Amino acid sequence: MAEQGKVFVFDHPLIQHKVTRMRDVNTPTKEFRELANEVSLLMAYEVTRDLPLSDVEVETPVQKGVFKEVSGKKLALVPILRAGLGMVDGMLSIIPSAKVGHIGLYRDPETVEPVEYYCKLPEDSASRTVILLDPMLATGGSAAAAVSFLKERGINDIKFCCIIAAPEGIQELHRQHPDVNIYCAAEDEGLNEHFYIYPGLGDAGDRLFGTK
């Protein structure tokens, strides 16, 4: 049986402050986009906390010594289009060597099932830790489908990173993929009758791109 995935909620004061600014209905698109970038940057530290280290000999201006460096574990960032794009630059500023793929999904109006309309991934994705990005984990349907699409391509080392998660989304993602860890800046109360996270921050894609 696969190990049960965990949920990591980041309580760093800077993250919490910036998420509060994102929630504010009066925060304009430009600032919202900048805040999403900054929150993603801060979250990248914690998402990569378990990267393996190895010893390396380095000569400093004073003497030689043995120090730690990341032991070559490769990473890939995969945003779920379109809102996931708002988290890429912040992550890349901390892990610039990561490759970036993209997954596009839409919900079939009749079956209400997620349908993949675009997928472009690094050729060596199966050998990388893939960090799947989407600002909101609401029902969990799209996130779970995206994980399934990755696994169908031989990718099994997957982390899901979002800014705000609903309990329903966490439950659904772990029901379908119990091995995937979830990283978020806040776990909110739940979903309203329109399947929006409450209190939430509204439609992240619309607020990122000014299409509200």
Image (cartoon, grey):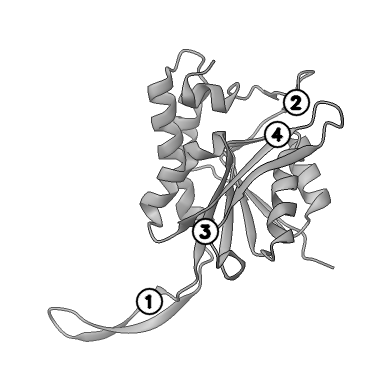
Identify the image quadrant of residue 171. top right
Taking the image as shown, residue 96 lies to the left or right of residue 61, namely: right
First in sequence: mark 3 vs mark 2: 3
Give the residue at mark 1: 68
Picture coordinates of residue 120, whole percent (x, y): 57, 52
Whether residue 41 is visible here, answered yes or no, is no
Q: Nearer the viewer, mark 2 or mark 4?
A: 4
Label 2 and label 4: CA atoms lie apart by 19 Å
Give the residue at mark 2: 191
Quadrant location of the N terminus in the rendered image = bottom right
**Residue type at tag 3:** Ala
- Which labelled disc corresponds to residue 106? 4
Within 10 Å of the Cα at label 3, are there few (<14), some (14-19), or many (20+) other Cα atoms?
many
Within 10 Å of the Cα at label 1, are there few (<14), some (14-19), or many (20+) other Cα atoms?
few
In percent of the image, x 50 and y 62: which residue is there? Answer: 75
**Residue type at tag 4:** Tyr
**Residue type at tag 1:** Lys
Label 3 and label 2: CA atoms lie apart by 30 Å
Quadrant location of the C terminus in the rendered image = top right
In percent of the image, x 56 and y 34: which residue is there? Answer: 82
Q: Where 90 falls versus 3 (above or below)? A: above
- Helix, strand, or loop for circle 3? strand
